[in-house]
Amino acid sequence: MTASTEILFALAAILLIPLYYYFTKLRRIEKFFENFPNPPMVPILGNARDFRSGPEFFKSIYEYTRKYGKMVHMKIGPVGHVLLASDYKFLEFLLTNNNIMAKSTDMKFLEPWVGKGLATVSGGPKWKIHRRIITPAFHFKILEQFVDIFESASNILVQKLSKESGNKSVDIYLYVTRCALDVICETAMGTKVDVQNTEASLYFHSVREMCRIFLARTTSVLKRYDFIFRFTKDYEIQKKSLEVLHGYTKSVISSKRKELEETRKNGNYSDVDDLGRKKKKVFLDSLLEAAVDGQSLSDEEIREEVDTFMFGGHDTTATATSFLLYCLAQNKDVQDKVLEEQNQIFGEEKCPKVTYTNLQEMKYLENVIKEGLRLYSPVPVFGRRIDQDVEYEGKIIPKGVEILVYSHGIHMNPEYYPNPEKFDPSRFENIDGKYPFAFIPFSAGPRNCVGQKYAMLEIKSLLSKIIRNFELSPAYPRHEMILSPENVLKSLNGVRVGIKCR
């Protein structure tokens, strides 16, 4: 074969490969999306210009749903196609289908931190084994041991907030997020990082940087590509942050494993300490001890799951708690009912010994939390990827379709929640369970949040403590939150309330 012939073959391949991709994959996806309405698009960019920032993205998908319905076709760039979905029947099909387990391709940007943990792995045998091993770590007998940790961290939070008493405009999120990170470190690894008392915590800073970089990569046209990202400043920041995060987690795992092996070797394992108190079993302990069908997790797999828990468990509870405090500040009648329930449980005791049973008794506060999660879901949108052809209502959804589940959209649907803009916890007193997929702050189906009971318990503990100690009021001057779906839903200008010691 002559050189000129080789060049012709190369040129032909360059031309034919994109055509093959188009007619075998992309064209099938485009034909599928012809069945759905789409907002006006511009050439090449499609609808991408509507998503130039987080707040604009949030407003755009809200307007898309309002104008075009519960199933909307969005085109992102020249070849990207996304189905924005908030239709109940479709979400029920999607979230319960065992053949649709893959999460959004954006989750790959988390892998440098959490590896192939439960949040990022796309179903299959590994996901099933890890899920079966991890689920018992959130049994109520484990969770009730965490109540003392919640109480200890929230006591520090109360001390910090007491210094703000009388302040008519306090950014509550700054305090709550540090408290949540203290809680997650102690419940996940059994270690005290004490970021509430350490302003310059390197671990806290590294967590925040990795969350920021994850968001930056999901929203940047250039940073999405690894070969470009490697030449950015964020790549160097990521390397340094991962050294801190992975180094800390690995050292704790190593220490815990040696401790476990030593106790087993000496045959002196006991679930009580030297003072006769029951030892707390944290998330890491459960992973080290667990096995399914004789198969346990390696140290690296345990590190991935612990870091996954760290990523998914601190920001979600912090933002949910902050938004709930904002709602309580804005709705004094609801706040008064929460306080009344607290007084019924604890009486006049200022610093009661709070138990797991006490938290279970807070039925009204639980409805308050559910209503807050409806209005301000920490994860208002989340992705699914169709990784094999599936049939829905007689039509084939082709492999490669990206779906954006708009949970906030169904939470604001008046068909399920009359007067949806109103903060009304009483609506959850009458929920009959007829539409379980109309309330999905923790997703639903086989890939629902494995830690949702943990999250509810922690949020309940923090709110209970704060309301018993402080009276909340709307911030002055008036504060309107600027909402943006980042790693979780956040307010770009803080979550401000007025605060006064009771």
Image (cartoon, rainbow, N blue to C red):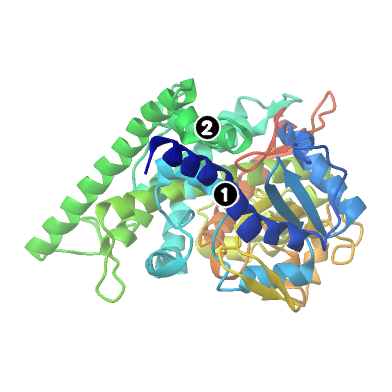
Which residue lies under the disc numbered 2? 213
Total marks placed: 2
Query: Which label number is shown at residue 313?
Result: none
Which residue lies under the disc numbered 1? 16
Which corner quadrant of the image does residue 1 belong to? Answer: top left
Q: Residue at x 80, y 51 (%)?
A: 334
Q: Is residue 64 left or right of residue 13?
A: right
Q: CA distance from mark 1 to mark 2?
A: 36 Å
Estimate the x, y position of residue 424 in percent, counting from the top left: 84, 56
Q: Can residue 196 be seen from the camera position used here? A: no
Q: Amino acid at mark 1?
A: Leu
Estimate the x, y position of residue 214 in percent, counting from the top left: 53, 37
Helix or strand or loop: what does disc 2 sit on? helix
Q: Can residue 73 be seen from the camera position used here? A: yes
Q: Is residue 322 left or right of residue 329?
A: left
Q: Residue at x 85, y 60 (%)?
A: 413
Helix or strand or loop: what does disc 1 sit on? helix
Q: Where 241 falls versus 359 (above or below)?
A: above
